[in-house]
Image (tube, helix red, strand yellow):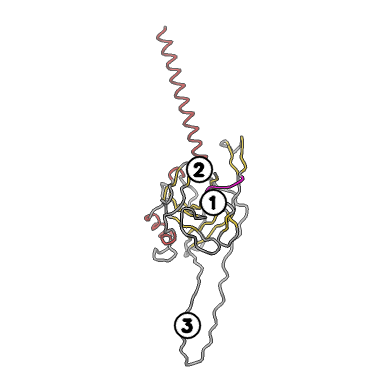
């Protein structure tokens, strides 16, 4: 009897250990999913396009020969920009989005993500590379010889370290850029504002990522929380849809 009782107690203990392990694993998995970037609610959308300059007039006499120097600025059809401000909160929700507690944010930090794919495996996120950039240019009918090709635009590997969910992106490890402030290019350092980094997941889906800089003077000397540019297919009849995600920390 003593041996049977001992075996029963050991079986109960083993079962308890297994159940405890399953519970801990489930909680860890749940935390991992909730830590991933999520889709934001867009409350304001104002899109602008440049007004082309009028033609430059020149009048010369018949029989004359005129040498002129022309300086022209052309709006690129291969990129588009998103700028704006971010608000939000941190919450502790269940699977039905019911909150047990939330925290208002006095300051906003984190990242804004833009991708042409509506499903990203955030657990496998990592730096993009030259091969992916070449493929992305091909997908968008963009020549690598263009001055504004993706390769020539994300030409740096200089940026801060940051996390995507639970994944650390080491500083100065990914293709990167920094958008302008007050109509002027920034010096590319790890302390530059509005840094943008090119990432991919394990399915090679590209994610354009900009680091939030709250209430920072932006490209037109007005305050924004984020600025980013994303590529476009100039030969496509309909504009490409980008899916936006946000991660606040």
- Judging by the rendered image, the residue that carries numbered circle 3 is 68
Q: Distance between the residues labelled 3 and 2?
A: 57 Å
Residue at the location (55% across, 61% down)?
219
**Chief SS of the magenta region:** loop
Q: In which quarter of the image is the C terminus?
A: top right
Numbered range of the magenta stretch: 106-111
**Position of residue 92 in the picture relative to residue 158 (left or right):** right
- Judging by the rendered image, the residue that carries numbered circle 2 is 36
Instruction: Locate residue 177, reporting x and y percent.
Output: 46, 57
Q: Is residue 40 above or below residue 27?
A: below
Instruction: Locate residue 34, reporting x and y percent.
Output: 52, 39
**For the residues bearing labels 1 and 3, Cβ distance under 8 angstroms:** no
Q: Is residue 166 above or below residue 86?
A: above
Residue at the location (56% across, 72% down)?
52
The residue at the far bottom in this view is 63
Q: How far apart are marks 1 and 3 (CA)?
A: 45 Å
């Amino acid at each position: 009897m003593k041996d049977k009782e001992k075996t029963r107690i050991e079986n109960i203990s083993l079962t308890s250990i297994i159940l405890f392990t399953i519970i801990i694993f489930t909680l860890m998995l749940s935390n991992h999913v909730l830590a991933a970037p999520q889709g934001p609610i867009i409350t304001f959308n104002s899109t602008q396009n440049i007004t082309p300059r009028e033609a430059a007039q020149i009048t010369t006499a018949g029989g004359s020969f005129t040498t002129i120097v022309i300086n022209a600025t052309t709006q690129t059809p291969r990129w588009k920009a998103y700028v704006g401000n971010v608000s939000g909160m941190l919450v502790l929700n269940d699977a039905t989005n019911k909150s047990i507690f939330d925290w208002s944010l006095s300051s906003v930090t984190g990242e804004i993500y833009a991708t042409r794919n509506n499903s990203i495996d955030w657990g496998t996120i990592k730096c993009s590379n030259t091969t992916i950039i070449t493929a992305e240019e091909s997908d968008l009918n963009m020549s690598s010889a263009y001055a504004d090709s993706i390769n020539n635009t994300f030409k740096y590997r200089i940026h801060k370290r940051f996390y995507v969910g639970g994944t650390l992106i080491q500083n100065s490890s990914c293709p990167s850029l920094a958008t302008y402030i007050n109509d002027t290019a920034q010096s590319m350092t790890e302390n530059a504002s509005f840094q943008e980094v090119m990432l991919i997941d394990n399915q090679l889906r590209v994610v354009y990522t900009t680091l939030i800089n709250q209430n920072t003077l932006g490209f037109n000397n007005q305050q924004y929380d984020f600025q980013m540019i994303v590529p476009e297919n100039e030969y496509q009849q309909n504009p490409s849809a980008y899916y936006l995600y946000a991660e606040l920390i």
